[in-house]
Amino acid sequence: MDEHRQTTHTSRSLPCHARLPINHCNLPAIILGSLTFQQHPIPLHLDGVEEFHAELFSSLEAIKDSHERAVNFQDYMRSAFLLDHLDEAGFNPKGRRRRDKADYLRMLRGWLFDPDGKEGAVLKSWVESRFGLRALNHHGPLKDTMSEQYLNYQIACARGLYNTNALEAQLDLLYTYCQYEISRKHSSQGHIRLYRGINRIDEHEVLHRPNKHDYILVLNNLNSFTSNRERADEFGDYIMEANIPLAKLLYVPSLLPGSLRGEEEYLVLGGIYQVKLSVF
């Protein structure tokens, strides 16, 4: 009985190597990354973002059409971060490294093309900073912080953020806007069922296996899922099915209509999840 209690407790608590001691969120990583949070989520808020951009969210309240709200949001992003006037933001077109295209949309497009690319490293680094969930994989495992693999990840993060225009603040607002839209459309819903194709379960850190098909495991700090089970089958031999807290969605399809083509992906924050594994 004591051994069962210890196993259950261990499977609920996010391991030390998967979290940071501080973040910029209303809950610490050990809580928001726990199995308990997956089962009983509450809203997550990044420090000061809603308050600093109160004018945006106040204006969105009066707009009933979601497409119009998305246009309003993107107009606000261009204005707040001078995306159409980068010279005013200090951009030097004669500089050695051109970073004028490195905005929140470029990060999303880069992730959709290759989650292990430079843009993927930036997004994972942002999740580490804001939510305290450590990146566990980028072109390979990152558990050993002294490894060459981890050093290369840090270099990719630095290169991706170098000389950009408040890129992390842009991502802060993207997450907050996504959560705002979700709250308007799913006010009485706490979860969404999503799917992810994988090749091997041992690609993940398994904490407990309650039965033949259910696993309690630790996901990377940012992951791609889909709501289409058949679509998930295209990306692996096995299908991982999970109830994802809405609070852990950074991006959902149709959030920014017309800005990202051909994407059906949900960007999901990591932590501990109970998932069901099956063959399509």
Image (cartoon, rainbow, N blue to C red):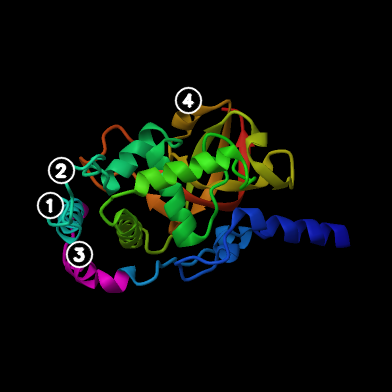
Label 4: how many Cα within 10 Å (few below 14, some 14–19, many 20+): some
Q: Are marks 4 and 1 in contact (CB under 8 Å)?
A: no
Task: Please tell me which residue is depicted at 17% across the width and 47% down the height of the picture.
Answer: 92
Please name which of the two marks, 1 or 3, marks the residue nearer to the observer. 1
Q: Position of residue 266 (x, y in %)?
A: 41, 44
Q: Position of residue 263 (x, y in %)?
A: 33, 35
- Which numbered disc flags the more N-terminal residue, 4 or 1? 1
Please state which amino acid type lies under the numbered disc 1: Asp
- The magenta segment: 50-66
Rendered position, 260 above or below 63: above
Residue 202 in sight in this render: yes
Q: Mark 1 to mark 2: distance in Å?
A: 8 Å
Q: Circle 4 sits in a helix, a strand or a loop, which is it?
A: helix
Q: Are marks 1 and 2 in contact (CB under 8 Å)?
A: yes
Residue 60 tag number: 3
Please state which amino acid type lies under the numbered disc 4: Glu
Foreground pick, 159 / 133: 159
Task: Please tell me which residue is depicted at 49% across the width and 65% down the height of the picture.
Answer: 23
Q: Mark 2 to mark 4: distance in Å?
A: 42 Å
Please name which of the two marks, 2 or 4, marks the residue nearer to the observer. 2
Q: Mark 3 to mark 4: distance in Å?
A: 37 Å
Q: Circle 2 sits in a helix, a strand or a loop, which is it?
A: loop
Magenta stretch containing residue 59, yes or no? yes
- Which numbered disc flags the more N-terminal residue, 2 or 3? 3
Please state which amino acid type lies under the numbered disc 3: Leu
Residue annotated with mark 4: 234
Rendered position, 26 above or below 129: below
Label 2: how many Cα within 10 Å (few below 14, some 14–19, many 20+): few
Label 3: how many Cα within 10 Å (few below 14, some 14–19, many 20+): many
Residue 61, quarter of picture = bottom left
Residue annotated with mark 1: 87
Residue annotated with mark 2: 93
